[in-house]
Amino acid sequence: MRERKRRETQQRIAEVGQRLFLTQGYDSTTLDAIAAEAGISRRTFFSYFKSKDDIILFWMDAGLASLIADLLKTSPDVPPLDAVRDIMVKHIASSTTEQMTAIDNLMLSRESLLARKQAYYAEQEQALFKALCEVWRQPERRPALRMVAMVSIGAMKVALQAWREQTGPRKPAARFLRDAFDSLKSEL
């Protein structure tokens, strides 16, 4: 019961923080504002998060955990790269272009956030590799599964950069991600 209440409070703080960051901007959102809207004290905030940056990492962790959970449900009969592609595209398609743009702008607004985002790619790659090894259990496949994890995160980075740099009417990020995987497969 206590752990459930802790998770619920942490989730509420993260949701309030995300909403305030996206409506008021990261720098304009204070810890006091987040705490007040979440119904907690500023001191209590620090029992759940060390900083505002940690709220953003909480979202990223939740997204990665959901992606990994879906990957772990995959049949080992599916080629690993196809499985990762389909799951990544599904996850990125669940966000609207407006949400993606707002979050991307937020991540680019501060050097500390951008640096943490770059470091997080390595964590995503490790988590993806571990999940791939759980689905495709043959030890002799590990080097290839490591490469699948690496190129999948690389495809995501390339796709998000192309999505960010597009001009004209915004196309969904999921389309860029699918195109990146298609290009990767055709080159292989």
Image: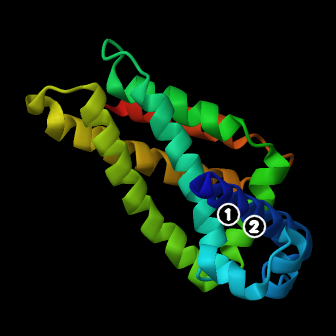
Kindly identify the residue that appears in the image at 86 percent across and 46 percent down.
169
Kindly identify the residue that appears in the image at 64 percent across and 82 percent down.
46
Residue 156 at x, y percent in the picture: 51, 47
Residue 114 at x, y percent in the picture: 58, 75
Query: What's under tag 1, amino acid-wise?
Result: Gln
> Which circle marks residue 13 in the picture?
2
Residue 135 at x, y percent in the picture: 30, 26
Left or right of 53? Residue 16 is right
At mark 2, the secondary structure is helix
Q: Residues within 10 Å of mark 2 (few under 14, many from 20)?
A: many
Kindly identify the residue that appears in the image at 13 percent across and 26 percent down.
138
Left or right of 180? Residue 94 is right
Q: Which residue is tagged 1?
A: 10
Residue 42 occupies quadrant: bottom right
Asked if residue 182 can be seen in this view, the reply is no
Residue 87 at x, y percent in the picture: 53, 30
Query: What's under tag 2, amino acid-wise?
Result: Ile
Q: Is residue 133 above or below residue 155?
A: above
Residue 110 occupies quadrant: bottom right
Judging depth in this view, the residue of 129 and 143 nearest the camera is 129
Q: Is residue 9 above or below residue 139?
A: below
At mark 1, the secondary structure is helix
> Which circle marks residue 34 in the picture?
none
Judging depth in this view, the residue of 91 and 17 nearest the camera is 17
Is the Cβ of the residue at disc 1 closer than 8 Å to that at disc 2?
yes
Asked if residue 68 can be seen in this view, the reply is yes
Q: In this view, does 138 lie above or below 163?
A: above
Q: Residue furthest top?
A: 77
Left or right of 150? Residue 103 is right
Kindly identify the residue that appears in the image at 55 percent across and 40 percent down.
66
